């Protein structure tokens, strides 16, 4: 990429920057460089998405954070329908911890009653009432001496691990297809944390920004050259 950028800079200095008459050969060279920039930018954008998603999977697993499949439908497909063999250990581990938590919760009549009401709730008022009642129930449960907290965190850890591994599986799928993996589900604060100053991700992002800047400049100069337009001077 450095070679391409250097050749572009040399051509700018030799006349493109001031938009003197551009020969057909120069225009062809500009278009060739633009094609190379586009190809490099496309590849680096995909690599950035893979690395960002992988870093997010690591972050969520380390912090017992649940990865939502909103904006990433294939993650839901993997978890709920495909259930690949490579993820079965994690799925079963989560199922076991969830069953333990459910077993404990169902020892409370109040929990069973609220769960029943939640399923039967239709109107907004009914749903809000159940939600309020559940909030009070969870608060009371956390204040008591019982195994709830341990069971809850065990289930949380298991599902965080399962979802993180599922996301890694999804990333591998997109890599195999040479496609950019969606990353819109990563919130701004988390994205900022992952793009820490000096990190490999931040450096890759800066490289992409530089490529995009050169790409825009090349497109503008090619357009001016094709139509014989000079560059507007700043006053």
Image: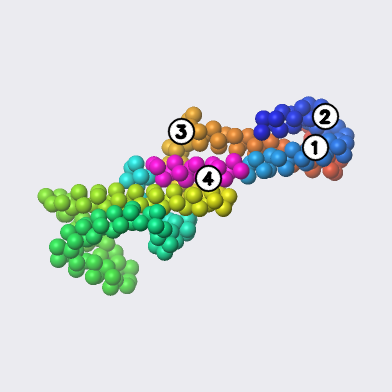
Q: Are marks 4 and 1 in contact (CB under 8 Å)?
A: no
For the stretch drawn in magenta, what is the main secondary structure? helix
Given residues 23 and 189, the one toward you in this image is 23
Residue 3 shown in magenta: no
Q: Are marks 2 and 3 in contact (CB under 8 Å)?
A: no
- Mark 3 lies on a secondary structure that is loop
Say which residue label 1 marks: 29
Q: First in sequence: mark 2 or mark 4?
A: 2
Q: Start and end of the magenta stretch? A: 43-59
Q: First in sequence: mark 2 or mark 3?
A: 2
Circle on res. 196: 3
Given residues 191 and 167, the one toward you in this image is 167
**How many callouts does the rendering have?**
4
Q: CA distance from mark 2 to mark 4?
A: 37 Å
Q: Are marks 3 and 4 in contact (CB under 8 Å)?
A: no
Q: Are marks 1 and 2 in contact (CB under 8 Å)?
A: no
Q: Is residue 209 above or below residue 104?
A: above
Residue 62 in view, yes or no: yes
The nearer-to-camera label among 1 and 2 is: 1
Query: In the displayed structure, does residue 146 sit left or right of residue 206?
Result: left
Say which residue label 4 marks: 49
Say which residue label 2 marks: 15
């Amino acid at each position: 990429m450095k070679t391409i950028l250097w050749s572009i800079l040399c051509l700018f200095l030799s006349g493109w920057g001031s938009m003197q008459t551009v020969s057909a050969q120069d225009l062809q060279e500009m278009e060739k460089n633009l094609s190379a920039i586009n190809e490099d930018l496309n590849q680096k954008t995909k690599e950035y998405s893979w690395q960002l998603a992988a870093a997010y999977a690591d972050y969520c697993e380390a912090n017992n954070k649940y990865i939502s499949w909103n904006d990433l439908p294939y993650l839901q497909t993997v978890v709920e329908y495909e259930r690949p063999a490579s993820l079965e250990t994690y799925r079963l581990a989560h199922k076991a911890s969830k069953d333990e938590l459910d077993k404990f919760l169902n020892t409370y009549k109040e929990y069973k009653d609220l769960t029943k009401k939640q399923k039967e709730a239709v109107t907004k008022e009914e749903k809000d009432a159940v939600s309020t009642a559940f909030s009070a129930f969870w608060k009371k449960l956390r204040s008591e001496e019982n195994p709830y907290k341990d069971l809850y965190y065990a289930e949380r850890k298991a599902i965080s691990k399962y979802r993180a591994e599922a996301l890694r599986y999804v990333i591998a799928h997109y890599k195999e297809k040479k496609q950019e993996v969606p990353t819109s589900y990563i919130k701004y604060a988390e994205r900022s944390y992952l793009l820490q100053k000096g990190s490999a991700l931040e450096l890759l992002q800066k490289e992409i920004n530089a490529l995009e800047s050169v790409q825009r400049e090349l497109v503008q100069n090619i357009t001016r050259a094709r139509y014989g337009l000079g560059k507007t001077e700043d006053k």
